[in-house]
């Protein structure tokens, strides 16, 4: 009985009561550029009394920062690298948060007549058949990787007669496509933010092959004992909570008339 | 101080508290055990449930993978070796069967296509036994995604030849654990070897605890207790996790909090119950104690003397009985106290009586001492007066004797006769004085008691008043006693006077003389067998026993002050006792009084002195040594003896007497005063007897001092003659002393100082 009575927890005092340093987030550009982060961050701080110190780089670079112990939590969209990050013991509790969409854009006239196609692979195959002009970023980005994968799936080897590779970012690529009246693959958020300056429109979207999943991963506290594991899990839980998922789902609706991100954590969301 | 109330309370506490506390402790123990057991049950049930859930998930992946593997488009693409189509199928499968990775490998293990990412992981599958096994499998184990579900589904062509494998992989990741968590309400963590893969534990300390538990728990079915969590391991039906661990944790803090609350609750209930019990005990104890207190109050009241308290106790029966006993006790005590008061009063009365008696005794003692002093004074005076009277009387006698030869005028004869008469009167006064002071010299002789009484009859009749009839009854058998006739007279006078005082309105006084046979075996005809009785009785007022008992006490008197000295009967008693007799009194109120005196039998050979005939004065020629310090008495004695024909040696002191005796030698009789300076008569006689053991002695004494205090001092054959004495008395006693045979026993002689 005494053991029961005296069995008080001897755990240290709740660190929540102490002022803590800001949680280090290594994130991908694509959550910052469209302004999603600037909406989520204050909400997170309000709900958890934690401040975020975010660094936005490319997904691969974000994971690399975490590997060097310079982040507590990573928010990225590069599944293979993420899997490796976890398998190699750098991270734990990888969680799908959302996906953004890639879209195939083109001139409003849509000379290749791909608008409304349900399969992105079919649409690309058609473009190659008609020899419609296509502008590619031509860099090592995720968008480029996805474009190449889609061409591969379509069984098409792009021909320079209609296919030009720019070695540039999405913005430049979209402007080039707009000027040339060419087709291009873009992430939806970037396109929507630039839509007003472009003579382009979304022609193909919704194919699962055009989905771009984002995940959030805590840095493994076994590997980085100084990392803020609890803060990381707080952030993961926030993003995958109903409130977090709703914020994500609604972001951009008012401004663009369509959501920019689609929640992925509904099924596995925290209670 | 311990009170019954407190004792009852503490008894109740001792009786009630331990079972209550025990019950509380046991209940609490059972409850906490149940809680702990419940936690463990939940944990172990969760482990089994999780295993089942993972199996179900694996089955689902396998089923969907198998379905996809049968997709005709995929088969066609494979057969036609259209890699893009194969890749497209793989990509499609990724989203269709909800796995992390889908790979299509050929029969040799070479990767043909992989879903979601054009990554290069070499010939991983070629190195597995997948190509050689030739059959599908589904397992939860370690793979290239860490701990994961892995399903290999064969893709067959139209002729059922396996052309490729569809391999689906799904890591046991955070989302999987969250699903389990939601399903079982437990925390889950999964390790790939020592690498933490995913966990639902968000708190680092909890995670550390889980780490520790993982290292401790070697097998499923056991529970590891931590501070905040209890942990158990899950196992799997298939190949098992191998180097991996799926750990389940249950947060025990709420349970511990519950246990603590339960402890407090039980404590509160136990204390409350004890409190209620004690409260009840207090009330019961008060109920029990109240009647006892009533008894106590009654006892206190009784102690203060209030014995008539009322006790109204109806119940309980024991107390009622106690009250009854107490009431009875009080009753008894009241009786006892009454008795005590009575006894006390009696005691006080007796003490008062005794005190009074003591006061009287002291008064008597004082009187007695006064009288003794007076008597001693009187005795001294008497001694000197006796000497003087001996000289006066003796010389008057001589003078009268001489005058007979001379023809002196009648007036001279009359004068000498008056002198003689005066001397006798004076001697009688002295005698009376000495009798009062009980220093009378007894001169016991053998008397015929009847004769003595008859001689005194005339005088006794004179004592009595006219309304009193005195009767004399003298037995015809002569009754002899050894006594001083004068003293017998005193006895009779005193008893007669006493009898007369008991007859204030007249009556009868009877004097009886008779004898009784004391010794039944003795010859009644001899005097030795008979003891004499002298009885004086009256038919007067009589007296009570108390008075009769004290009648012989000196100074005890029933007469009015001035009417009597209280010495009369005391004198009687003294005389009788001095004579070796006894006196008893028989009396009762209104029945008269009888005094009965018993005298011891008189010596056989002693003849009663004939008083009626005065014999001729005996004479002798023997040598007599006279020792007397008083010159007058010495000369008179010498004269009387010489006139009787005796040869007289005269000495004024003991020393002179010794000298004279030494000079003369033969001495027939020593006549000596008793009280003399330097050497008294007894001492002188003893000295003389040193040489003449047969010496006879006649003591002359006017006062018997302490020098003669026993028969051994004086000798049995010695004679004593009281002063004053006449010539005839002297000569008669001298003759008797000389004639007394040496072996004859002397008469009883008692002297007292």
Image (cartoon, coloured by chain):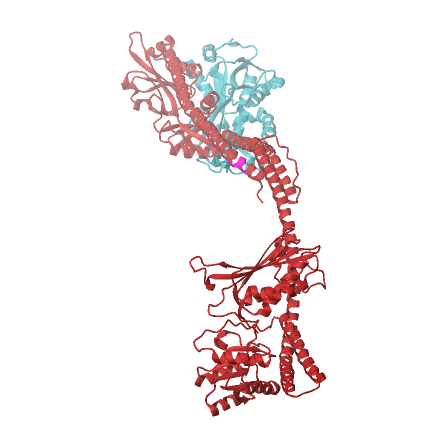
Chain colours: A cyan, B red
Indicate the quadrant containing the N terminus of chain B: top left, top right, bottom left or bottom right.
top right
Indicate the quadrant containing the C terminus of chain B: top left, top right, bottom left or bottom right.
bottom right
Residue B432 found in image quarter? bottom right
The furthest residue to the front: B407
Whether A59 is drawn above or below B349: the answer is: above
The furthest residue to the top: B158
Pick whichever, B72 or B259, lies toward us. B259
Q: Is residue B493 left or right of residue B195?
A: right
Q: Is residue B315 magenta?
A: no
Q: Is residue B56 left or right of residue A4?
A: left
Whether B283 is drawn above or below B550: the answer is: above
Mark yes or no: residue B568 visible: no
Whether B607 is drawn above or below A106: the answer is: below
Mark yes or no: residue A29 visible: yes
Pick whichever, B374 or A251, lies toward us. B374
Pick whichever, B40 or B97, lies toward us. B40
For the magenta stretch, what is the residue range?
A: B10-14
Residue drawn at (28%, 16%), measured in percent from left and top? B134
Whether B595 is drawn above or below B678: the answer is: above
Q: x, y percentage for residue A198?
A: 59, 18
Q: How many marks?
A: 0
């Amino acid at each position: 009985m005494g053991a029961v009575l005296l069995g008080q927890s001897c755990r240290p005092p709740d660190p929540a009561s102490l002022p803590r340093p800001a949680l280090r987030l290594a994130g991908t550009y694509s959550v910052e550029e469209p302004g999603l982060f600037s909406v989520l961050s204050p909400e997170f701080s309000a709900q958890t009394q934690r401040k975020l110190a975010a660094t936005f780089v490319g997904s691969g670079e974000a994971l690399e920062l975490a590997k060097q112990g310079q982040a507590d939590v990573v928010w990225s969209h590069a599944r293979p690298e993420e899997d490796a990050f976890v398998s190699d013991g750098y991270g734990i509790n990888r969680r799908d948060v959302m996906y953004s969409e890639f879209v195939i854009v083109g001139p409003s006239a849509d000379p290749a007549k791909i608008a409304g196609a349900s399969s992105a692979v079919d649409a690309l195959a058609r473009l190659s058949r008609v020899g419609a002009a296509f502008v590619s970023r031509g860099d090592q980005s995720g968008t480029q990787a996805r474009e190449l994968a889609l061409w591969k799936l379509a069984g098409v080897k792009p021909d320079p007669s209609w296919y030009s590779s720019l070695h540039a970012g999405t913005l430049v690529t979209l402007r080039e496509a707009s000027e040339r009246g060419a087709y291009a693959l873009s992430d939806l958020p970037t396109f929507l933010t630039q839509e007003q300056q472009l003579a382009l429109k979304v022609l193909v979207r919704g194919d699962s092959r055009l989905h771009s999943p984002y995940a959030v991963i805590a840095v493994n506290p076994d590997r980085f004992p100084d990392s803020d594991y609890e803060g990381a899990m707080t952030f993961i839980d926030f993003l995958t909570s109903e409130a977090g998922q709703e914020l994500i789902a609604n972001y951009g609706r008012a401004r663009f008339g369509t959501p920019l991100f689609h929640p992925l954590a509904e099924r596995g969301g925290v209670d | 101080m311990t009170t019954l109330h407190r004792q009852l309370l503490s008894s109740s506490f001792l009786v009630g508290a331990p079972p209550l506390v025990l019950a509380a402790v046991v209940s609490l123990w059972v409850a906490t055990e149940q809680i702990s057991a419940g936690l463990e049950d939940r944990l172990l049930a969760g482990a089994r449930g999780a295993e089942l859930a993972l199996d179900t998930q694996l089955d689902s992946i396998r089923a969907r993978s198998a379905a996809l593997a049968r997709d005709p488009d995929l088969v066609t693409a494979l057969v036609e070796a259209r890699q893009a189509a194969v890749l497209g199928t793989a990509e499609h499968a990724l989203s269709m069967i909800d796995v992390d990775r889908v790979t299509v490998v050929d029969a040799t293990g070479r990767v043909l296509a992989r879903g979601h990412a054009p990554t290069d992981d070499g010939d991983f599958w070629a190195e597995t036994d997948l190509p050689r096994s030739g059959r599908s499998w589904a397992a939860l184990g370690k793979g290239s995604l860490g701990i994961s579900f892995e399903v290999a589904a064969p893709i067959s062509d139209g002729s059922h030849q396996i052309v490729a494998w569809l391999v689906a992989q799904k890591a046991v990741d955070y989302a999987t654990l969250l699903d389990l968590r939601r399903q079982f309400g437990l925390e889950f963590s999964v390790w790939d070897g020592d690498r933490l893969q995913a966990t639902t534990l968000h708190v680092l300390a909890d995670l550390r605890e889980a780490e520790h538990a993982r290292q401790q728990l070697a097998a499923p079915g056991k529970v590891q207790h931590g501070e905040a969590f209890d942990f158990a391991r899950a196992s799997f039906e298939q190949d098992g996790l191998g180097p991996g661990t799926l750990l389940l944790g249950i947060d025990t803090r709420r349970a511990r909090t519950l246990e603590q609350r339960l402890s407090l609750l039980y404590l509160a209930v136990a204390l409350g119950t004890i409190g209620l019990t004690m409260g009840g005990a207090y009330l019961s104890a008060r109920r029990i104690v109240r009647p006892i207190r009533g008894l106590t109050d009654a006892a206190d009241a009784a102690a203060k003397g209030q014995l008539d308290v009322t006790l109204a106790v109806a119940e309980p029966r024991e107390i009622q009985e106690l009250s009854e006993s107490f009431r009875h006790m009080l009753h008894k005590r009241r009786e006892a106290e009454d008795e005590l008061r009575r006894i006390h009063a009696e005691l006080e009365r007796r003490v008062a009586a005794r005190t009074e008696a003591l006061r009287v005794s002291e008064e008597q003692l004082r009187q007695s001492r006064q009288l003794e002093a007076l008597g001693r004074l009187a005795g001294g005076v008497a001694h000197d007066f006796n000497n003087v009277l001996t000289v006066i009387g003796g010389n008057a006698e001589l003078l009268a004797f001489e005058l007979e030869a001379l023809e002196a005028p009648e007036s001279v004869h009359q004068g000498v006769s008056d002198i003689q008469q005066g001397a006798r009167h004076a001697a009688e006064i002295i005698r009376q004085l000495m009798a009062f002071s009980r220093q009378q010299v007894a001169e016991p002789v053998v008397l015929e008691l009847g004769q003595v009484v008859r001689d005194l009859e005339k005088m006794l009749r004179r004592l009595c008043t006219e309304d009193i009839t005195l009767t004399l009854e003298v037995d015809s058998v002569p009754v002899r006693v050894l006594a001083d006739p004068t003293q017998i007279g005193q006895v009779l006078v005193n008893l007669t006077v006493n009898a007369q005082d008991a007859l204030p309105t007249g009556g009868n006084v009877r004097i009886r003389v008779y004898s009784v046979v004391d010794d039944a075996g003795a010859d009644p005809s001899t005097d030795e067998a008979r003891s004499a009785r002298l009885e004086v009785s009256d038919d007067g007022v009589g007296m009570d026993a108390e008075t009769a008992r004290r009648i012989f006490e000196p100074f005890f008197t029933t007469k009015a002050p001035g009417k009597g000295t209280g010495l009369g009967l005391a004198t009687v008693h003294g005389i009788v006792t001095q004579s070796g007799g006894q006196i008893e009194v028989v009396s009762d109120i209104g029945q008269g009084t009888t005094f009965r005196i018993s005298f011891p039998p008189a010596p056989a050979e002693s003849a009663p002195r004939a008083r009626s005939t005065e014999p001729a004065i005996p004479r002798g020629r023997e040598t007599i040594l006279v020792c007397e310090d008083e010159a007058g008495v010495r000369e008179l004695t010498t004269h009387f003896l010489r006139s009787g024909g005796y040869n007289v040696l005269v000495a004024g002191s003991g020393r002179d007497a010794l000298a004279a005796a030494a000079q003369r030698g033969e001495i027939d009789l020593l006549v000596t005063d008793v009280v003399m300076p330097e050497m008294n008569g007894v001492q002188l006689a003893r000295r003389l007897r040193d040489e003449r053991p047969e010496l006879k002695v006649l003591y002359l004494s006017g006062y018997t001092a302490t020098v003669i205090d026993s028969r051994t001092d004086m000798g049995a054959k010695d004679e004593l003659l009281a002063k004053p004495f006449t010539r005839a008395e002297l000569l008669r006693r001298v003759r008797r002393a000389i004639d007394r045979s040496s072996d004859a026993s002397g008469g009883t002689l008692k002297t007292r100082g």
